[in-house]
Amino acid sequence: MIRNEAEYQNASARLKEEHTRLAEHRARLEATGMSEEEIKRVIDPIESFHLQLREEVESYERLKRGEFDELENLRGLGHLLIALRIAQGISQRELARRLDVHESQVSRDERNEYFGITLERAIKILDALNVRLRTKVEVEPEDQMAMA
């Protein structure tokens, strides 16, 4: 997950470089007379990395636009907290200042996507970001729960 503008700029530059490198590599393989199937076997792992990087860049761009995924049973809360900070254009340093903790603590927490965070801590972060989180409770019939 891209967590700040510097990582985004770096990933965007790498994405452009990888796109060019991938096209050049494909052209070199074609020049050797390899079949399309052989080229595909060689190129697939590289394309997989390229696609993953592109998804991360696009995900960061969606966050910057304020587009968030829904939470289900609080799964993904850590990711949402990071996304909210990014969407508001708040740096880790600024969030640390608002929380009265060291910047390295915020960096470490975000690197671990706030794994094991307490609800009290989540509330402090939401308050520091001036975010009000609303929930919608849906009770599933027992027969549907048994199938899940």
Image (spheres, helix red, strand yellow):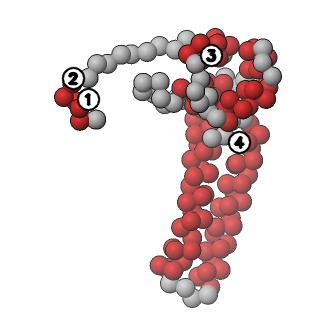
Label 2 Cα crowd, 10 Å radius (few <14 / some 14-19 / many 20+)? few
Name the residue that disc number 3 marks.
121
Which is nearer the N-term, disc 3 or disc 4?
4
Quarter location, residue 70: top left
Secondary structure, mark 3, is helix
Question: How many angstroms separate mark 3 from mark 1 (CA)?
Answer: 30 Å
Name the residue that disc number 2 marks.
141
Which is nearer the N-term, disc 3 or disc 1?
3
In the rendered view, would you say 23 is above or below 10? below
The amino acid type, in three-letter code, at marker 2 is Pro
Question: How many angstroms separate mark 4 from mark 2 (CA)?
Answer: 43 Å
Which residue corresponds to the image point at 60% horizontal and 45% vertical from the top-left? 56
Q: Can residue 66 be seen in this view?
A: no
Which is nearer the N-term, disc 3 or disc 2?
3
134 vs 144, left or right, is right
In the rendered view, would you say 52 is above or below 27? above
Which residue corresponds to the image point at 64% horizontal and 12% vertical from the top-left? 124
Name the residue that disc number 1 marks.
145
Secondary structure, mark 4, is helix
Which residue corresponds to the image point at 60% horizontal and 50% vertical from the top-left? 54
Q: In which quarter of the image is the C terminus?
A: top left
**Residue extending furthest bottom?**
33
